[in-house]
Structure formats: C-alpha cells, structure tokens
Amino acid sequence: MLPRNRRAKTSPGEHLRQIIIAPTTLQDTAPLDYIEATVAAGYDGIGLRVHRSPGLPFHPVAGNTALVAEMKSRIADAGLAVFDLYSFYLEPDTEVASFAPAMELGAAFGAKYATVMGADENWSRQRDNFVRTCDLAAQFGLTCSLEFAVIRPLATLPQTVRLIEEAKRDAVICIDPCGSTFTTSPVRNQPSWNASVARGSS
C-alpha cells in the first residue's frame, strides 16, 4: 500500500488533469485487488462497479459490510478520489428502484457520478426511465453521466444530447474516445451544444 498523498505536488500555477481508472480496465479483478492495482499504477481516482452490467464480470459489494469497510479504508489510505459508479443500464425491463442500493453505496464511497447506458429501443420508455434514474441519483447527491456507444440503442452524441434535453434533468455526458470513433456522428464534427446539457465527461 502506498501512503496517502503519494503523488508529487504541482508547482504554483500548474494544473494537471486527474487520471481516473474505469473498472472496465480490469473487469475480471476482485474489488480489493482492483484498488491495489489502481494505487500501484498511480491513478488519481477510481471508478467502482457497484451494479451489475449485462455481459460483464461482477463482484457484488453491496451488503458485504466487511468488504465495504476494507475498500473504504484502502481508498482513504491511498488518497484516491472515487469518481463514478458503474453501470446503470436502461433496458426494456428496467426497474429504476433497483438501482437504489448501489447508488446509496456509491454515495457512501464519495462518488460524484452514476454512469448510465441507454439500452432500450423504445425511446419514450428510455427517456422516462432516465428521468427516474436522474431523480433517484439526486437523492444520493449523484449526477447521472450518460454514455453512448454504437453497440447500444443510445448510439450517438446527438441522441444523447436529445435524451438529456427531453428529460430536463441535470446530467453530463460521458464520451468514450474508443466508442465515439465508430459512431456515424464523430464528436469532432459536432456543433456546439448548450453547456448546461453537457458540462463535463468522464
């Protein structure tokens, strides 16, 4: 375990962007090993998988009091910032209320964002579930970060902006450089959009 504040301090006036690891980087790795690898690699922050994602390995954390306590201890000792939570899929059979335990746990870790994936071909239902998800996340002090990918129904940046605008909720857009490379509407070709819709990305 590396000590807290292990990173070199920046000089006055110097600004460096933080580097945050996503759990998909080490998706087969158990939570404690994942934290150790993050610390050893020198990341500034960490994303945690606290909810099951379709087709991806999942190591349950919610309800395991001893594991949660140890994770919190190691994250705090390393001085890591918990950035976002993975992942909340909006599917045809999604029950948004089922997201609550994972969001509550993530908030207890100090997370800022809940990563949301649009995986429903029914636009109206997906929008309504996104509204509910944003409202639920807000109860735990979280902001939804909506990620588009060509492999899912919510596949492009324009669709993502539209969904947030129609939902009329505070949300940000998560842009995966790899995923956006293969969309039919590359990010580099997009016109500017309302900054209140997409104030940041993870």
Image (cartoon, grey):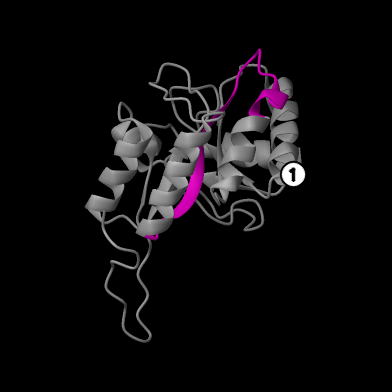
Closer to the camera in the image, 111 or 89: 111
Magenta span includes 91: yes
Q: Relative to 172, is 41 on the left or the right? A: left
- The local secondary structure at tag 1 comes to helix
Residue 49 at least partly seen: no
The residue positioned 45% from the left and 30% from the top of the image is 149
Q: Does the magenta run of residues contain 75?
A: no
Seen in the picture, residue 36 relative to 15 is either above or below; the reply is above
How many discs mark residues in the rendered view?
1
- Span shown in magenta: 79-99
Give the image location of residue 182, x and y in percent: 36, 32
Picture coordinates of residue 78, whole percent (x, y): 35, 57
Front-most of 121 and 66?
Answer: 66
The answer to whether 119 appears left or right of 47 in the picture is: right
64 shown above or below 84: above
Task: Name which residue lies at 34% across and 64% down.
Answer: 4
Q: Residues within 10 Å of mark 1 (few under 14, many from 20)?
A: few
Find the residue positioned furthest to the top.
93
The amino acid on which the numbered mark 1 sits, given as a three-letter code, is Gln
Report the residue marked by disc 1: 139
Which residue is painted at 69% across and 32% down in the image? 130
State the image coordinates of residue 120 (x, y, percent, origin top left): 61, 19
Give the residue at x 66% y 12%. Answer: 93
Q: Quadrant of residue 168?
A: top right
Q: List the single residue furthest toward the left.
A: 40
